[in-house]
Image: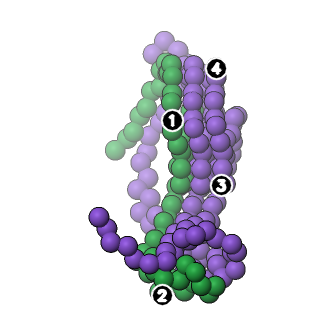
Chain colours: A green, B purple
């Protein structure tokens, strides 16, 4: 495959965005190479019941 | 094709509103060679509030030891880009928030490498019945 792009006029009136979060990119322009990675970890083991009043080290099994 | 292609494009923005930029985020106006935002976040929600960060260390969670390996099959596609107009025009932009290793780029950028790692822990006093 040969990928050919011809850019002519580009004009935008209004852009309204709420949030750009977690390794996201909003670009008005040109770019060569983009790598975006995001990891989010909230396993069942990280939901700890019954220790909110204790002063202790929190252990999350396997994590 | 009545014009000779331009080598670069210029971004024109009349007005840009950004409310907040937080946690390793970048608001970049102008051309950039490289952007590498990184954010490691340990989010602890505890019923009754948190009084100390003792006992919470990044090192004890494997998510903060991971490395992202580049894609094995890059699957490079050959091609070309021709800019027959040298401007990108935006009249108005309104962004509420940039957060957690995110980027807002007005202009050109060569390389972007962004990484965000979030570990979320919730601690509650007792299990409640869901109604």
Question: Who's the residue at 32% across and 72% down the image?
Answer: B129
Q: Tell me which numbered mark, 3 or 4, is placed earlier along the sequence.
A: 4
Q: Residue B43 at x, y = what percent?
A: 57, 67
Question: Who's the residue at 45% across and 27% down the image?
Answer: A6
Tags 3 and 4 on a common chain: yes
* Category of crowding for the residue at label 4, using alpha-carbon neighbours closer than 10 angstroms: few (below 14), some (14–19), many (at least 20): few
Of helix, strand and loop, which one carries label 4? strand
Q: Chain of mark 2?
A: A
Q: Chain of mark 3?
A: B
Instruction: Report the residue marked by disc 2.
Output: A61
Q: CA distance from mark 1 to mark 3?
A: 18 Å
Q: Residue A25 at x, y = what percent?
A: 54, 45
Q: Which mark is residue A17?
A: 1
Q: Which mark is residue B14?
A: 4
Q: Tell me which numbered mark, 1 or 2, is placed earlier along the sequence.
A: 1
Question: Who's the residue at 63% across and 61% down the image?
Answer: B39
């Amino acid at each position: 495959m040969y990928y050919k792009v011809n850019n002519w006029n580009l004009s935008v009136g209004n852009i309204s965005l709420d949030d750009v979060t977690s390794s996201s990119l909003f670009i008005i322009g040109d770019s060569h190479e983009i790598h975006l990675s995001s990891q989010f970890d909230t396993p069942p083991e990280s939901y700890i019941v019954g220790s909110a009043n204790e002063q202790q080290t929190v252990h999350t099994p396997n994590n | 094709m009545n014009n000779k292609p331009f080598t670069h494009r210029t971004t024109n923005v009349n007005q840009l509103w950004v409310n907040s930029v937080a946690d390793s985020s970048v608001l970049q106006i102008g051309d950039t060679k490289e952007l590498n935002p990184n954010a490691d976040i340990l989010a602890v929600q505890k019923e009754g509030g948190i009084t100390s960060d003792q006992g919470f260390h990044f090192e004890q969670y494997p998510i903060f030891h991971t490395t992202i390996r580049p894609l094995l099959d890059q699957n490079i596609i050959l091609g070309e880009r021709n800019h027959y107009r040298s401007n990108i025009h935006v009249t108005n932009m309104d962004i509420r928030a940039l957060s957690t290793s995110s980027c807002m780029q007005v202009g050109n950028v060569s390389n972007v490498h962004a990484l965000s790692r979030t570990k979320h822990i919730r601690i509650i006093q007792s299990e409640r019945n869901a109604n």
